[in-house]
Amino acid sequence: MSALLFSSPVTTMSTNHQVHLSNFQQPLIRRDFMTAADERILLRQAQEGSHQAFGRLVESHMKPAYNIAFRFVNDHHMAEEIAQDAFVRAHQSLDSFRGESGFGTWIYRIVVNLSLNAVKARRRRTLRFGSPEKIVPGRNGSDTREGEPLVRMHLNNAVDSLPQLQRKVVILRHIEGYSTREVSEILQCSEGTVKTHLFRGLHKLRRMLRFLKEEKV
């Protein structure tokens, strides 16, 4: 449990994954290698109508956008759709984007909101049709999803049960590894709020997952 709860595992897409925004496809440029100045230039060019410039922004931020979405929805296909939808919406709203935050901050905020909407919609379908949203395993782990480790499933369920702001902060700050400042900009709250909800969220997770350590799952 401790290795999962106190580390930041990285979720990646297949190396064969292709962004399905055909007008914007460009060779992959890692987010790490794009400076803030380069991003501002590309953003300005995209606002002037350059599909190539927007394509570079997409390729730079698609992987972290997908990772964030996946942490909320725990479904690869849904995470792909959310990430792509976020970029489509961003492109449609480029003219109104004033650049008060970085493009990455903006796109990740869109991803978080779309992810939460998707989770809410899935829960409504669950209540309507009576299909279980989560699988709660027995003590022997016999009810786990195929190929999903028991501990990982317990951790996902625990994170999903956190209050919304705590869940956002834990996913962005603790699991995905964004800085406190970055999280505060994405969520549009103070750094003090981020720290408070991170502390509360992790405390709740430790309490909820304590049985794993006791049973040595």
Image (cartoon, rainbow, N blue to C red):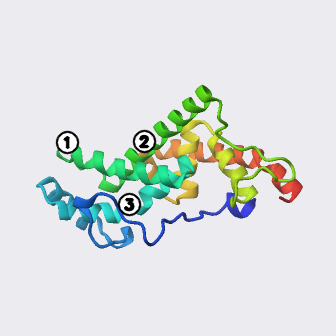
Q: Residue at x 33, y 72 (%)?
A: 28
Q: Which residue is mark 3?
A: 62
Q: Which residue is mark 2?
A: 114
Q: Residues within 10 Å of mark 1 (few under 14, many from 20)?
A: few
What is the quadrant of residue 7 in the picture? bottom right
115 lies left or right of 175: left
In space, the residues marked 2 and 3 are separated at their CA atoms by 15 Å
Q: Secondary structure at mark 3?
A: helix
What is the quadrant of residue 42 in the picture? bottom left
In space, the residues marked 2 and 1 are separated at their CA atoms by 19 Å
Q: Between tags 2 and 1, which lies in front?
A: 2
Residue 36: horizontal and vertical position, in percent? 28, 64
203 lies left or right of 88: right
Q: Could you say which disc has been placed on residue 96 in the image?
A: 1
Residue 127: horizontal and vertical position, in percent? 61, 27
Which kind of residue does numbered mark 1 sit on? Ser
Q: Residue at x 48, y 53 (%)?
A: 77
